[in-house]
Image (tube, helix red, strand yellow):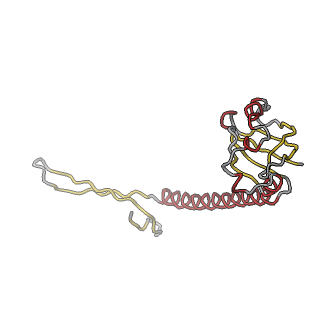
């Protein structure tokens, strides 16, 4: 793009196109130049760039808000006095907060990637437990007996909810209290 002075004296961006005119033998004999005022297009591009920067800033702010939300959730989960675990349907423990570790008398490392069914006093009851769960997002309450590391039996009241978009991809969130 070039800048050209308009008839009113204002400099405006223009797009120049050049065409050669040839004679019968193919030799160039003349040149035609056309200039198109592209100031509206340039203004539009400037506004579009500003809107793009504004959108990037908004997305960045939103991401920061999401990260703050996630950090708030993590802090709430870790400091909650309510014992909580998250498991897959097969019983693999994916999350356990400190209150759950205290209640189940286990370390977090011993619980994570361990299997919740192995903590049941009767490990064979897990398939029945999962089969009897209510539909997604409905709370199930029952009394469960867990076996602590020292083999003592801990009876807890458990509220469990199945979360996910479909049952096959769901996770179980357990809230335990003695």
Residue 121's quadrant in the figure? top right
Question: Which residue of the protein is positioned furthest toward the right in this rendering?
Answer: 178
Report the residue at 26% width, 54% height from top. Answer: 19
Residue 134's quadrant in the figure? top right
- Tell me residue 145's x, y (percent): 84, 42
- Tell me residue 136's x, y (percent): 76, 34
Which one is in front, 52 or 33? Answer: 52
Which one is in front, 166 or 174? Answer: 174
Which one is in front, 35 or 173? Answer: 173
Which one is in front, 47 or 31? Answer: 47
- Tell me residue 8's x, y (percent): 47, 67
Question: Which residue of the protein is positioned furthest toward the left in this rendering?
Answer: 25
Report the residue at 73% width, 47% height from top. Answer: 86
Residue 130's quadrant in the figure? top right
Where 128 falls versus 65 (above or below)?
Answer: above
Report the residue at 41% width, 61% height from top. Answer: 14
Report the residue at 54% width, 60% height from top. Answer: 49
- Tell me residue 54's x, y (percent): 62, 61
Q: Which part of the image, by quadrant, shows the N terminus?
A: bottom left
Where 28 falls versus 146 (above or below)?
Answer: below
Where 9 falls versus 171 (above or below)?
Answer: below
């Amino acid at each position: 793009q070039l800048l050209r002075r308009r008839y009113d004296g204002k400099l405006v961006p223009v797009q120049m196109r050049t065409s050669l005119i040839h004679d019968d033998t193919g030799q160039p004999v003349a040149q035609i130049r056309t200039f198109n005022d592209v100031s509206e297009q340039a203004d539009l591009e400037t506004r579009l760039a500003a809107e793009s920067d504004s959108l990037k800033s908004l997305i960045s702010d939103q991401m920061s808000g999401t990260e703050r939300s996630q950090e708030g959730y993590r802090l709430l989960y870790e400091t909650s006095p309510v014992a909580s675990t998250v498991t897959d349907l097969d019983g693999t423990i994916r999350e356990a907060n400190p209150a759950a570790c205290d209640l189940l008398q286990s370390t977090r490392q011993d619980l994570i990637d361990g299997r919740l069914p192995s903590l049941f006093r009767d490990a064979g009851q897990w398939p029945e437990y999962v089969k009897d769960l209510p539909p997604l997002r409905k709370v199930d309450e029952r009394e469960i007996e867990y076996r602590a590391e020292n083999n003592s039996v801990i009876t807890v009241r458990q509220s469990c909810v199945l979360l996910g978009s479909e049952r096959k991809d769901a996770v179980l969130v357990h809230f335990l209290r003695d």
